[in-house]
Amino acid sequence: MSLAQRVLLTWVFTLVFLIMLVLKLDGKVQWNWFLIFLPVWVFDGILILMLAIKMVGHCKPGYDARNGSPDLRLRAWYLAAMLLKLGFCLTLCAKLEKLADVKLTFVCIPLWTMLLGALVELGLNIFPERREA
């Protein structure tokens, strides 16, 4: 998938989600919160599928890791971050639909974990390990 296609796909799913969210918050529709977040989950599902396919490609016998692509550890972090985001969205929808009587603090734990991991990853990229020659 080219960069232009990925950008267009991102904008379309974001626009549909925001329109549905505004309609729900204005009281124009009485849709379920799980339905409102459906564009987010479809987009995340596509990203997870693409990421899983690329991770499986690393396991092929003839794969050459020197071509400049991110290593498997980084792709595993991306996968974990996507799953944490999905976990946050699911628990948020469950709370908004009153399916689970959970404190908002517990709902936000996957989000905070993802943000903390992103902060660590950013720190590792800013301050790379020094190699002695």
Image (tube, rainbow, N blue to C red):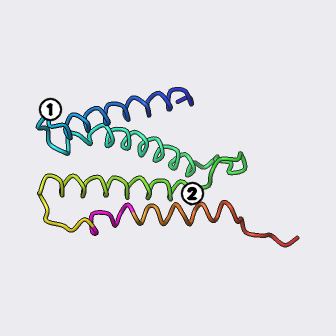
Secondary element type, mark 2: helix
**Res 16 → quadrant:** top left
Q: Tell me which residue sits at (29%, 32%) in the image.
A: 19
Tell me where residue 104 appears, x and y as whole percent.
25, 65
Residue 103 lies left or right of residue 89; in this view the side is left
Q: Earlier in the sequence, mark 1 or mark 2?
A: 1
Q: Amino acid at mark 1?
A: Lys
Q: Are marks 1 and 2 in contact (CB under 8 Å)?
A: no
Up/down of 17 relative to 73, above or below: above
Q: Give the main secondary structure of the magenta stretch.
A: helix
Residue at the location (29% across, 52% down)?
A: 89
Point out which mark residue 74 bears.
2
- For residue 124, the mark is none
Residue drawn at x 28%, y 69% as measured from the top left:
105
Classify residue 100 by image quadrant. Answer: bottom left
- Label 1 crowd bin: few (<14), some (14–19), many (20+), radius 10 Å: few
Answer with left or right where residue 131 lies relative to residue 119: right
Q: Position of residue 73 (x, y in %)?
A: 56, 60
Name above or below for residue 131 compared with residue 93: below
Residue behind mark 1: 28
SS at mark 1 in the image? loop
Does residue 64 belong to the magenta stretch?
no
Q: Which residues are magenta?
A: 105-111
Query: What residue lies at 33% left-to-right and 52% top-to-bottom?
Result: 86
Q: CA distance from mark 1 to mark 2?
A: 42 Å
Residue placed furthest toward the front = 26
Q: Amino acid at mark 2?
A: Leu
Extreme-bottom residue of the structure: 132
